[in-house]
Image: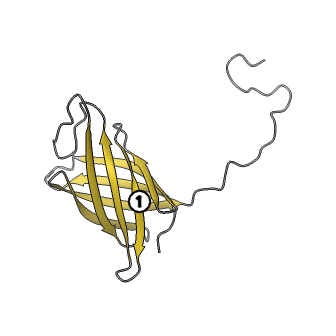
Amino acid sequence: MVNEGVYGLSFTALTASDGANRVEGLAMLRGGRVLGSDPHGGVFTGRYHYDAVRGEAVIAVRLAVPPNGVLLTGLEAGPEGLLVDISGRFAPAKPVSSAVVDVAGAPIAVEMRYVGPLSAGPPSAGPPSAGSVTGPGAA
């Protein structure tokens, strides 16, 4: 079973000996879909399903690297950017699950940490009260 919700991610290039090639990210899993990003502008979208026989989540995403972006592996995206297909199998995160995935021919260790469920929507706080500050220029 896959816990739908928000996951913190850590990506580490296995060729890095000093840990300098490590990036954090965030992903949301809901209804068989994955959406996530990293702090350098990489965005990934894809799908997941649960393999009950093996007890693993099977995740397949397409990473969109921004123009002139550089992957942990050292691969440069160039002026047009880059699309990279990535897939992996992860045991349920309790609280952390990890796997090694192939990213454009290089191994990357991925850790998924379950943060919590997605809420059904923002809590209803009602309209602002008179005299409340609601933004620039508010009295």
Q: Nearer the viewer, residue 61 or 119?
A: 61
Label 1 residue SS: strand
Q: Nearer the viewer, residue 59 or 113?
A: 59
Residue at 21% x, 36% y is: 77
Q: Work out which residue is located at the far right of the displayed protein and give it.
A: 130
Residue at 23% x, 28% y is: 79
Q: Residues within 10 Å of mark 1 (few under 14, many from 20)?
A: some
Report which residue position mark 1 lands on: 47
Residue 4 as seen in the image, left or right of residue 69: right
Tell how many labels.
1
The picture places residue 94, in percent across and down from the top left corner, at 43, 71
Vertical position of residue 30 compared to residue 52: above or below: above
Query: Quarter holding the C terminus?
Result: top right
Residue at 42% x, 49% y is: 36
Q: Nearer the viewer, residue 107 or 63?
A: 63
The answer to which quarter of the image holds residue 106 is bottom left
The picture places residue 122, in percent across and down from the top left corner, at 68, 48
The picture places residue 27, in percent across and down from the top left corner, at 43, 53
Residue 92 as seen in the image, left or right of residue 63: right
Vertical position of residue 97 compared to residue 127: above or below: below
The picture places residue 31, in percent across and down from the top left corner, at 52, 62
**Kind of residue at badge 1:** Arg
Say how the picture is coloured: secondary structure
Vertical position of residue 6 compared to residue 63: above or below: below
Residue at 77% x, 44% y is: 125
Residue 101 as seen in the image, left or right of residue 15: right
